[in-house]
Amino acid sequence: MADDLLVAHGLVVSYGQPRGLFARGRSSATVLHGVDIRVGKGETVGIVGESGSGKTTLGRALLGLVNPTAGSVVFDGSDITALDEKARRPLRRRMQMIFQDPMSSLNPRHTIGRILIEPIILHGLAESQKAARGLVNGVLDRVGLSRNTVDRYSYELSGGQRQRVGIARAVVLRPDFVLADEIVSGLDVSTQAQVLRLLKELTGEMHLALAFISHDLSVVRSICQRVVVMREGRVVEEGLCERVFAAPAAAYTRALIDAIPLPTVDPGWLTSGASVEVAATA
Amino acid sequence: MTMPRLSIETLSAISLRDGNRPILRRVSLAVGTGEVHGLVGESGAGKSTIAKAILGIVPSQVRIADGRIDFEGRDLLSLSARELREILGRDIALIPQDPSTALNPARRIDAQMTDGLRLKRNLLTSEARRRARALLEEVQIRDPDRVLKSYPHQLSGGMRQRVLIAAAFALEPKLVIADEPTTALDVTVQKQILRLIRSLQERHGTSVLFVSHDLGVVAKICDRVTVLYMGKVVEQGTTAEVLNSPRHAYTKALLAANPRYDRPDTGLEPTPPEVVAALRAEIAAFDAGVMGSRHG
Amino acid sequence: MEHWSPTATISTTDSGPQPPSVAMRLARDPKVVFAGGFILLLIVIAVAAPLVAPQDPLAQNLLAATLPPIGFTDAEPGFLLGTDGLGRDVLSRVIFGTRVSLTVAFVAAGLACLIGSLLGLFAGYLGNVVDTAISRLVDIWMAFPPVLLSILLVAILGTGLHSVIAAIVVIDWTRFCRVVRTETKSQAQMDYVVAARTVGFSRPAILFREIFPNVVPVLIALLTLEMGIAVVVEAILSFVGLSVSSDTPTWGGMIAEGRQIVHEAWWVLAVPLSALFATVVAFNQLGDGLARSLDPVLRR
């Protein structure tokens, strides 16, 4: 489709595990079994799944951080799976990521200022150091952090502040696509609301395409237009949020939605509902 | 009204490391016989401190400054370590938050489950094992013999949590403290575990103190709820009252900030700054009142 | 700037007061200050030995043999810490001995650190074939008995400071390699490395600008520990006569000599032994203090 920014087709990702020094074959774990997904320009797509669904691996494959065993990822016309790391470099500016744990995604030995300014300099987005610092101040203002944050280290900030730095880093290069991998999972509900609201505003203002990975369907509902439901490395269902939540087609999606506890008193909820036939391992 | 099983009266605690910063501010709550009582709050609200105070495992940098924890007529805070140890495990049990760290990775499940049974009930190993097997069946594990022979890492998260729940109910305690028991689990597994806890609780008439930050979970399993903000009880009542007609601004803000899949525009409302300011003022006034009464 | 929409719906949060700089943090840690000060003092003494030492360390004076330190009977003013069996001034010899010990400490530990760390960094970061090759090498290397290896080296290279240093480097580089490899591997898993990749940094840049600074605290602790070990190894080797020639005063050599006359002149053994002990303790404490004040995560 003309409006598609990122299209992945038939993605298969397997991790081979060598078995000893003289292994003939390799036992492998397949994490993605042929996944198709597309993200349109300026569109927010949620990728939901429980543990083992492969959603994190899918995200990394979309960004070219994991090389798929099969399949393609086409970003704005270029198949990034066919490019080597050097050729991917110019595209990197246009595809960014926000991480789940800002504690480990911000280098503890770098100041926030350094973390934000280095990408700008690497991609030559500012004519001078002063201009670069100006860009950094601008993005800090936008995400609601005070300017003296540039001198701080990540461990000096609160969880919500760190996550805002993560968002700032992702958008300071003015990318076309951002991947958000479980970015609100560890946050208090109020901080989560702040972060989600900020993200929603930014994607609107910057016409950003966003792929939002989460295990929490309610969060996805609040900011995504479309949703992709994954289970054990396969896409089970996808479509507009309105449709999928109102009338889920797949049994798994129904079970997933049914399992979400809404803050309403409902005595029949516990004993009722579709239950997924989970193997004896659960 | 009958005597509650557990009655916490004006429990106060301070952090010795932070210049005596209050962690709990005169918390009072009561859990009746057979009641599931939800203790809700965000991180840092003090919910786990309350749970630890009941179990007698408050960290050394926290000091209980005031109050009672009344369990079956005895103040748990005044008991000796030996007396407390008799009660724990037998009358009060814990379902911990993280099933992956709560089990000893080096020991098999049957060994870990029979520990308590042999210690507290003086059962022979064979009897204890039989009882453990029966308990695993009670928590709907289809293949209890295999599970008993397994090591924790061979089981899934949901399975481990079932084992821990079985272990908690093993000695038929009067009170179970469930410390965010489903936070680490997938949502479909969470529902099964909640269902399980409720059915076990109903069958044995156990009281449960259910600690959680998730209002949705609390709504589905708890009879009554206490909402905690910065160590202070801001709302208390039946689940229906608290969720449908909240009185305190914090409860309202919490409900508004929670995203709901059936209401698309929820989850994007952070607590307005005026509300935060009012809450802070409320806490400050409370602290000043406490200081005043102490010097008065 | 103009790019951003003026509506800041999020309240700006202040990040608090400015934290102390690295130098200030170091200056506040008592271990760093005292141990570091002691080591610095030793360095000064070693460098300025001819100026600091009251006597010629090699000058024998049989008339002034086994004189006790000042404060005891029969002591003489020129020999503050007494003399040994050949009438040589113990204090001056200990001062000159500092030269040997510190040279070995810094050069041997430094080289072992350099070689081991580089290999460890590459093994930890590049993984796969490189890692397997280096790890196998380390495993095989560590299987050789170290004492035998040192004796072999000294036999080949002859006695002297160069063989002592070589012996320490040849044996101890593996320790650095293992530790740095583990730390590098663990840091390479961190999300900030992935973040650097998404930004577009090259692999060498990621290794040296992102990962290496996080490996440094562990490295520094190990380096100072190694310096302490090097000092002891040198003392042992000179105790058995495998270090520098017996003319040059070394702490180990003095301990060997002092051991033989410990009942008549205990100070000949006690003084160099105390110096050795104090130096090793200082290195360890310095390492511990540095690791703690330099590592932002550990300090919490």
Image (spheres, rainbow, N blue to C red):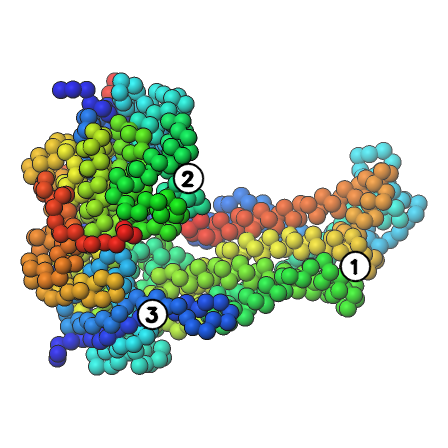
Whether discs 3 and 2 lie on one chain: the answer is no
Q: Chain of mark 1?
A: C
Choose between C172 and C72: the one closer to the eye: C172
**Residue B172, position in %: x, y?**
28, 29
> Could you tell me how many numbered marks the image carries?
3
Residue B187: give x, y in percent of width and height. 21, 51
Q: Secondary structure at mark 2?
A: helix
Could you tell me the amino acid type at mark 3?
A: Ser
Q: Is residue A210 left or right of residue C125?
A: left
Which corner quadrant holds the C terminus of chain B?
top left
> Considering only vertical position in the picture, is A223 above or below B75?
below
Q: Which residue is mark 2?
A: B111
| Labels 1 and 3 positioned on one and the same chain | no
Crowd around label 2: few <14 · some 14–19 · many ≥20 (10 Å): some
Q: Which residue is mark 1?
A: C242
Q: Are marks 2 and 1 on the same chain?
A: no
Residue depicted at x 40% and y 34%: B126
Q: For the residues marked 2 and 1, what is the alpha-carbon distance in whole angstroms?
A: 57 Å
The N terminus of chain B: image quadrant: top left
Q: Which residue is mark 3?
A: A14
Q: CA distance from mark 3 to mark 2?
A: 37 Å
